[in-house]
Image (cartoon, rainbow, N blue to C red):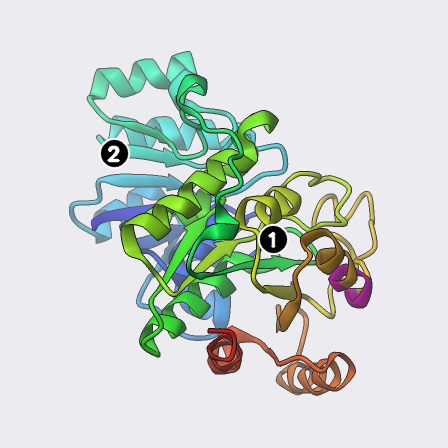
Amino acid sequence: MENAVVYCEGKFGTSTGKTANGLVRYSRRFRIVGVIDSTKAGRDAGEVLDGVPKGIPVYSTLEEALATTENVKYFIVGVATIGGLLPQEYREIVKKAISQGMNVVSGLHEYLSEDREIAALAAEHGVKLIDVRKPRPLKEMQQFRNLSRGLGCLRIPVLGTDGSIGKRTTALIVTDALNSAGIKTVFVATGQTGLMQGSDYGVPLDSIKGDYMVGELEAEIVRAWMEKKPDVIVVEGQGSISHPAYVCGTRAIIMASQPTGIICQHAPKRGYRNFGRDTLKLPMPDLRKEIAMLEIFSDSKVFAITLNHENMTKEEIEEYVKIYERDFGLPCCDVLVHGAAKIVEAIKGML
């Protein structure tokens, strides 16, 4: 693990800052030594996100971060913008990081390695531009082969009712909890943040051409089985099955994994879909209808509900746990608050 700072000016702790948020919470590829966001400078990054210090300071500027921490080799673009474009105001700081001899990691659709000015500057300073969301060459891609249903393990995608709702974080916590319980489990990433965090398996799903999307993810699930022979494969979800702006993610994940069971993540107090929340005002879906859609499309069952606690008090979290367990007859928890013990017990019953 090499030292990295994450740039997330004005967005840390928001849904747009999900890449920075995820790396602060969990990283096996980079040692995150600081977050740069002048609006939250001076605080601990873990305290900003979850009220629990992580020993990762938030800095005002790149210069401040570099003056405080030695041997920082990587500069990570910590935002996941709608459309995947590099914010124009981020260009100068990216160029400054390159001039400081830092490798730049980006998970955007706008590939830095194909930007003439940035690529030329990187070549001049001998640093790498790592575009995590850039898929493999087309001729190396695989198409659907209907292999997952024959694998000798449980295949559990963590799906949800919206984008940027915590599916990846829940999937990682569940994976670690299962391994700690002696149930051999592998996580398969489907987005840029999971890959940045160090997942051994996965693809940048929304960057892959439609003909190959399911096959490429299926190939990673099969590779995880062949190499690790796990009891469980947990697959990161994307978007939601009913979301009008994310038409492929959930469907592709279901087809690629052929689930033996599904975890559904929901934010009870989120009023509008994350996509264009302040402008389009697309209402959040009804949880019962969403679960029904997932089960019909997958020919599988949702066996647990997990919560995203945004805009919720501790008392409200506990109240919704009681309501959902009563109304749906399924275990329910917020893994960031309660841990994943309920999910582990449910999965034990499926083995």
Q: Is residue 199 visible?
A: no
Which residue is disc 2 drawn over? Answer: 102
Residue 233 place in picture, x, y as percent: 43, 58
Residue 1 place in picture, x, y as percent: 21, 51
- Residue 289, magenta (yes or no): yes
Which residue is disc 1 drawn over? Answer: 164
Q: Tell me the kind of residue under disc 1.
A: Ser
Residue at point 54%, 28% (across, down): 212
Q: How dense is the environment of label 1, judged by Cα within 10 Å: few (below 14), some, or many (20 and up)?
A: many
Cα distance in 3D space between marks 2 and 1:
29 Å
In the figure, is residue 290 to the left or right of 174? right
Residue at point 32%, 13% (across, down): 120
Residue at point 24%, 31% (across, down): 100
Residue 177 place in picture, x, y as percent: 39, 74
Q: Which residues are magenta?
A: 287-291
Q: Is residue 32 above or below residue 322?
A: above
Q: How dense is the environment of label 2, judged by Cα within 10 Å: few (below 14), some, or many (20 and up)?
A: many
Residue 199 place in picture, x, y as percent: 35, 50
Q: Is residue 233 visible?
A: yes
In the figure, is residue 73 to the left or right of 344? left
- Identify which residue, 340 or 127, lies in the foreground: 340
User: Of helix, strand and loop, which one carries label 1?
Assistant: loop
